[in-house]
Amino acid sequence: MDVLYYWKDVKADMAAGHIGWFRSSRGKLAELSESYPDRIWVVKTPVGKKGSVQLLACVRWSDKAAVKVPVVDVQSTIFYDPAHVQSMWFEGADSDEAVEATSKWLREHFSAAVRANFQGDNGIHALRGDTLRQLEKIAQNFATRPFLATDTE
């Protein structure tokens, strides 16, 4: 099982050193942790394209902090390993065609999240089976670079 995470403020968070963890609710984190997730697929809304999403990154889930993080509430924090070989940014996922493909996939599988503007738990979902395979197929169209590369977009 993997996880889909909507990351609203990527640039601001990265500039503030917010690396290695995401916020979550305790209930959602408990639900996800029970299924032993492997990766977190990160999406965001591209500037000027409300209602659309861009596949931004894929990072390796971690059960504990893999890098030094500020004091956080561990019961509502999703950790990831930014240095893991599977943690990567997607290149070219911001093209109109790529955004349309990702948005179509998201509307098909998580329409309630789109309608709710990804607020709260609507921005975090389990990915399994064919839904995950379809996202992996979309991601195959993009080049990747290590997550810890300095440029975030």
Image (cartoon, grey):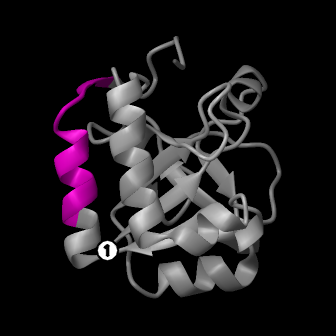
> For mark 1, does the 10 Å Cα neighbourhood hold few (<14), some (14 to 19), or many (20 or more) residues?
some
Residue closest to the eye, 127 or 15:
127
Measuring 22% from the left and 60% from the top, which residue is drawn there?
134
Measuring 49% from the left and 70% from the top, which residue is drawn there?
110
Amino acid beneath label 1:
Met
Instruction: Identify the image quadrant of residue 70.
Output: top right
For the N terminus, the image quarter is bottom left
* Furthest-top residue in this view: 151
**SS class of the residue under badge 1?**
loop
Residue 122 coordinates in the image, percent (x, y): 66, 70
Answer yes or no: is residue 60 visible.
no
Residue closest to the eye, 152 or 105:
105
Q: Is residue 141 magenta?
A: yes
Eyeballing the image, is 152 above or below 6? above
Measuring 28% from the left and 42% from the top, which residue is drawn there?
86
Answer yes or no: is residue 136 visible.
yes
- Residue 151 horizontal side relative to residue 39, left or right: right
Eyeballing the image, is 66 above or below 114? above
Eyeballing the image, is 110 above or below 40? below
Measuring 49% from the left and 47% from the top, which residue is drawn there?
42
Instruction: Identify the image quadrant of residue 132.
Output: bottom left
- Residue 70 horizontal side relative to residue 96, left or right: right
Residue 114 coordinates in the image, percent (x, y): 61, 61
Eyeballing the image, is 96 above or below 44? above
Q: Is residue 40 magenta?
A: no
Residue 48 coordinates in the image, percent (x, y): 68, 26
* Magenta span: 133-145
Residue 136 coordinates in the image, percent (x, y): 22, 52
Residue closest to the eye, 62 or 110:
110
> What residue would you read off at disc 1?
1
Instruction: Identify the image quadrant of residue 40.
Output: bottom left
